[in-house]
Amino acid sequence: MGTPEVPFGLQHYTVDGSVVLQFSGELDIWANTVLSPHVVRQLDRPCPRVIVDLRPTTFLDAGGLRLLVRIHKQVTAAGGTLRVVLGRPRVRRVIRLARLERVFTVLDGFPASLAAPGEDDGSGPAPPEQPSAVRPG
């Protein structure tokens, strides 16, 4: 009997002084419950610029929105800025319906200024060789 597949994940890394939190899979109430402590711990140190990368996110519901709002509150309370990179149309629609594009700085692609050398299509940097990943299981 194998380990059940976990439908979500989190990688976090730093690029040019910006902390990147890249969520993958389903960002729902279960993901919120499991990933929140990891996110809080990651943002517990000074992080003037935080980017939440939702491009690999396949599903977003109220639990995921709650996690994004928690990140926004923690970052701005510490005097930092938060940018959210959107991906799939389904995720974009949820952000739009929740009117969070008025709260977050929403980007259509990863900031070109943070792209790896030779990457200018806005798809974003390649994570470092050993990003910190959270995959509960």
Image: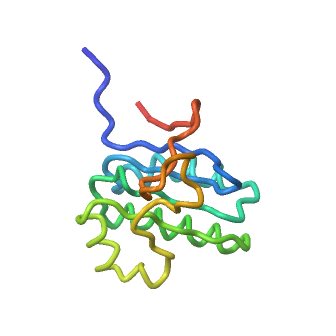
Q: Quadrant of residue 79?
A: bottom right
Q: How is the image coloured?
A: rainbow
- In the orientation shown, which residue stands out farthest toward the front? 118
Looking at the rendering, in which quadrant would you find the C terminus? top left
- In the orientation shown, which residue stands out farthest toward the right? 46
Looking at the rendering, in which quadrant would you find the N terminus? top left
- In the orientation shown, which residue stands out farthest toward the top? 1
Q: Residue at x 60, y 45 (%)?
A: 13
Q: Percent x, y for residue 100?
A: 41, 79
Q: Percent x, y for residue 118?
A: 52, 46
Closest to the observer: 54 or 6?
A: 54
Q: Is residue 67 left or right of residue 79?
A: left
Q: Is residue 2 left or right of residue 136?
A: left
Q: Percent x, y for residue 126?
A: 50, 42
Q: Quadrant of residue 17?
A: bottom right
Closest to the observer: 32 or 121?
A: 121
Q: How many marks?
A: 0
Q: Quadrant of residue 73?
A: bottom right
Q: Percent x, y for residue 120?
A: 47, 55
Q: Residue at x 58, y 56 (%)?
A: 114
Closest to the observer: 25 or 53?
A: 53
Q: Check the image and report above or below for 30 versus 101.
A: above
Q: Residue at x 36, y 56 (%)?
A: 29
Q: Check the image and report above or below for 63 versus 37.
A: below
Closest to the observer: 27 or 63?
A: 27
Q: Is residue 21 left or right of residue 136?
A: right
Q: Residue at x 44, y 63 (%)?
A: 85
Q: Check the image and report above or below for 96 versus 92.
A: below
